[in-house]
Image: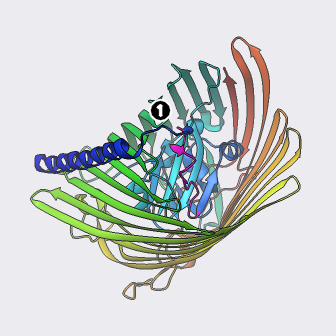
Amino acid sequence: MIIMMRTFTKSFLCFNLFLLLFCLLDAEFAYPQDTVKSVDLDSVLIEDTQISIQTDIVSGDYLSKKHLSNINVQSAGDAAKFLGGVLVKDYGGLGGIKTVSVRGLSSNHTSVMYDGVSLFDNQSGQIDLSKYSLSNINSLSLANAQFSEFLPTAASLAYASSVNLQTRRPEMGANRFKGDLSLTYGSFNLFNAGLFTAAKLSDKDIITVLGDLTNTDGRYTYKMYYGAGQSLSTDKMKRENNDMFSSHAEVNWFHTFSLRNTMKAKVYYYYSERGLPSNVNLYYQNSKQRLWNGNLFAQSEFTSLVSNRLTYKNSVKVDWNYTRYKDPHYLSGPNGQDDRYTQKFVYMNNCLNVKLTDNAFVTFTDDLSYNSLDYTLLETVPERVSSLTAAVLTCNTGNWTFTADGVHSYYKDKFKLDGRTYNYFSPFFSVKYARGGFSSVLFYKNIFRMPTFNELYYRRSGNTALKPEKTYQLSLSNAYSFSVGNVLLRAEADIYYNNVKDKIVAIPLNQFLWSMLNYGKVDIYGCDIKTGAVYNIAKDVNLDLKINYSYQKGVDMDENSYTYKQDIPYMPRNVGSAVLGFEYGQYKVAYTCLYVGDRYSLQENIPQNLLKSYAEHGFNCSYTAKINRYKAEKLCLTASVNNIFNKQYEIIRAYPMMGRNFNLKVQIFF
């Protein structure tokens, strides 16, 4: 561990010294005058009359604050279901774990970012989006391939897709203090309380403090089916051991050193305890499994416009993550199973953008990280040092934009006496044509996924000989935006092909023991269609519509597999969603619909493994009143109903989802 930390520290210092000297020299000789006009801290977007900055995405989707309010759900995991091309694996209930899959690839291929800095979990490789409350989320965006950021992190370029959770930053104006308090009560004894405060300490400093608590017993009703074909009889049951308590606190600091230099810092804390209900295949409801999770991290981001030609960004993050899983009924020991995991993570990114000409710039970005996992069943703590280095070249000529980048990934693992090194080069290339409201983007990307600590070192199933999983992506996207009178319209159609080699799969040796192997080959192809419309009917009267449809097919192409040329599990051919919002002055109503088609729960495409399609409908309405009393500015009341038709369905086999449920929310702004 000491040797790995020394290596990490040396790399950290050398890279920082190089960038610092380079920036200082260029600032001294190339930038004698301050000509900057504006700095936007929200998106870390620095604008200058001589600098052109790309802010769009190669291909993807976006949910604004208005869309999120129309959807009216509790967590980012539930909101992500309305992003085009995204599937969310949901184990049911408010406390159910929720992970995302984009364009048929596993959750491990999606980078989840919180305010532009990646969230990491080298234990499982999957980020649980149910942990992130929407109370502090301003927008949710998806990028297939990668975001076209001006100053990207190398991690955001090294994944097949990225999801960014952008938090709130208040517009203070002349106010020195602003905030809001919200209380929500709903079905199954759901209770949520949230507080957000913002203070303008000076013209250069804004600080926000927020927190929320959520609690539910999760005891919703579902139908149990008995007999051959599960059609002989039914019984109403209550979902047991599905309770959840969570708390979240966060402090953000925004500081402007000057018009050229800005900084923002964040401290984030999360704690939860939840029951893990059993599946209902064997009619067993006496699960006592529990899961505890604690997460504390601090991150900072410094951005500097060094000169007309140079822009620099530094991001630093320190993360501590604790997980405990307990199953008192596990038969391998007298006290059952009690696993405890502690992850420690240190991360730094340096990014330098160099303007070559008025129409071309190059970006150099490097991520350095150190990660360790302490696990009760491991005698030795596995450690991983990684370096991701990328160079991005972007050229604009007329209506054409060309982007090419290469990411070099270096990983060094240490476990017991074994030390393994992995190197891989991932190219990316895109061509964009834009004219008027029309744009077309073609991209190719080759990336690879490192095996997680669980896949490599987990005592019950790990395989230290695993190879990284390689993925090849090809996509064509066409979009057109136009207006007709007071109506703004946008339509986008994407077609894509993904090829996965050395796929990491779990093979059961017996009921309790699994083995991780490389053998899978998968072809995935499909299309995404996204449409949106905004109709300004009259003053303070607006109609907003967003519709997504996705068709995708993933096929097992491993000739040695017994499921050769069959669909891979949990990939429906058809997925669609719609969000319709109507606003009339102080009143708002919204309707949502989510459709997921038939899919298989196991590799064999037989009727017994088929999960039927479902559609879930929701409705909410709200009223906002200006009060201007007792230091309060306005009051907002929201009532919502989800799963209106009380449809029972399963996203994961034998984990029934909630039926019809209601929520009532009161929010006071001051």
Callout 1 environment at 10 Å: few (<14), some (14 to 19), or many (20+)? many
Q: Main secondary structure of the magenta part?
A: loop
Return the x and y of residue 452 as percentages of the image width and height: 31, 59
Return the x and y of residue 390 as percentages of the image width and height: 36, 61
**Residue 490 left/right relative to 607:** right
Return the x and y of residue 583 as percentages of the image width and height: 82, 41
> Which amino acid type corresponds to the residue marked 1 in the rendered image?
His
Q: Nearer the viewer, residue 20 or 662?
A: 20
In the image, which residues are magenta?
Answer: 40-59
Which secondary structure lies at badge 1? Answer: strand
- Toward the left, the furthest residue is 417
As for residue 516 lying within the magenta part, the answer is no
Q: Nearer the viewer, residue 51 or 323?
A: 51
As for residue 46 lying within the magenta part, the answer is yes
Tell me the residue that label 1 is attached to.
Answer: 248
Q: Residue at x 50, y 25 (%)?
A: 204
**Residue 172 left/right relative to 515:** right
Query: Which quadrant, please, contains the C terminus?
Result: top right
Q: Residue at x 52, y 37 (%)?
A: 41
